[in-house]
């Protein structure tokens, strides 16, 4: 079976990547984090998502260590703070990220969330970074529909490659308006917290007896069920990349195995009944 993939630019990427939020904070030994990321690369999880915000650059340093001697096997995503998204400050922020990562080019560089600096200024900086080869693609994160439309209408806004937002089985508000608009404009979505690890939605699908039972029926862990749902589609070409945290080598193996899980229409119907999508637009969930 062909691994489900998402296309960014001309590059085909696996529909599940590796997140690094809370890495570099000393919660677990650094080498454990490095080995988890490297194992993910070995298993084909080539998308590694990080940000200057994560451990104030510490996560980028962990990623950099994991990439030593194998830069070409990874598609690196990083993000800048909104207050570092100015005409010149975005250049400085990107160069600092590149230094921490120990690489010459970031594959995808995102504005972490909307801020007070004008998007025209941010686009100008991102385009300069592209022209100088510091980044290959740029995009945004935590943009709701109105903000994405505003960006799209600006000169250069059409080149926004992705929007990274919170999305999981218990948080489906993006399905009402945001995802349909993005699909119409051929813009893939990156889903952070796909296992509902954080937030204020008041429910934890991983601990739900119904989810546990359904996962047991499929012979898989609940986390694999949630990941397979997040990237669900009947075709190999998909438009959602899930980026669960690469917290341990065992979890990375489980995440990679979810690429091979195919959910039947009957299973999807049961999941819809357990966690239905809203029927009207709701505020964008953000962590």
Image (tube, rainbow, N blue to C red):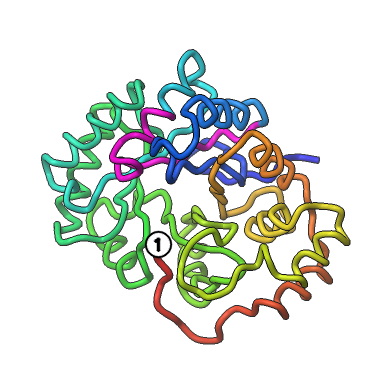
Left or right of 194 on screen, residue 151:
left
Locate residue 119, reporting x and y percent.
20, 57
In which image quadrant can residue 239 be found?
bottom right
Which quarter of the image is occupied by the N terminus? top right
Locate residue 130, reporting x and y percent.
28, 34
Instruction: Name, please, the residue furthest toward the bottom.
Output: 279
Q: Is residue 8 above or below residue 61?
A: below
* 52, 199: nearer the viewer: 199
Report crowding for label 1: few under 14, some 14 to 19, many 20 or more residues within 10 A (C-alpha).
Answer: few
Q: Residue at x 58, y 31 (%)?
A: 36
Q: Residue at x 40, y 77 (%)?
A: 283
Q: Residue at x 14, y 47 (%)?
A: 86
Q: Secondary structure at mark 1?
A: loop
Q: Is residue 64 above or below residue 280?
A: above
Q: Residue at x 27, y 67 (%)?
A: 150
* 93, 201: nearer the viewer: 201
Instruction: Name, please, the residue furthest toward the top.
Output: 69
Mark 1 highlights which residue? Answer: 287
Residue 60 in view in this figure: yes
Residue 233 in view in this figure: no
Q: Which residues are magenta?
A: 44-62
Locate residue 145, reporting x and y percent.
38, 71
């Amino acid at each position: 079976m062909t691994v489900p993939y998402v296309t960014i630019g001309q590059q085909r990427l696996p529909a599940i990547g590796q997140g690094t939020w809370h890495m570099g904070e000393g919660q677990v030994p650094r080498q454990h984090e490095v080995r988890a990321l490297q194992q993910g690369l070995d298993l084909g999880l080539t998308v590694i998502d990080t940000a200057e915000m994560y451990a104030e650059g510490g996560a980028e340093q962990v990623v950099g260590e994991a990439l030593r001697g194998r830069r070409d096997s990874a598609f690196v995503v990083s993000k800048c703070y909104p207050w570092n998204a100015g005409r010149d400050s975005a250049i400085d922020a990107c160069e600092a990220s590149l230094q921490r990562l120990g690489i010459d080019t970031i594959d995808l560089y995102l504005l972490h969330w909307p801020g007070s600096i004008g998007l025209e200024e941010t686009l100008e900086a991102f385009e300069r970074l592209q022209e100088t080869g510091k980044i290959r693609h740029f995009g945004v994160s935590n943009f709701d529909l109105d903000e994405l439309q505003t960006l799209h209408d600006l000169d250069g806004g059409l080149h926004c490659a992705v929007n990274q937002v919170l999305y999981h089985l218990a948080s489906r508000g993006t399905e009402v308006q945001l995802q349909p608009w993005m699909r119409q404009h051929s813009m893939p979505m990156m889903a952070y917290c796909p296992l509902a690890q954080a937030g204020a939605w008041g429910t934890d699908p991983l601990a739900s007896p119904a989810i546990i039972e359904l996962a047991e029926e499929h012979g898989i862990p609940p986390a694999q069920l949630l990941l397979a749902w997040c990237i669900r589609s009947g075709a190999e070409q998909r438009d959602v990349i899930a980026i669960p945290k690469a917290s341990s080598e065992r979890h990375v193996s489980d995440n990679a195995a979810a690429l091979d899980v195919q959910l039947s229409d009957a299973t999807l119907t049961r999941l819809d009944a357990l966690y239905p999508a809203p029927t009207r637009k709701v505020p964008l969930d953000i962590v």
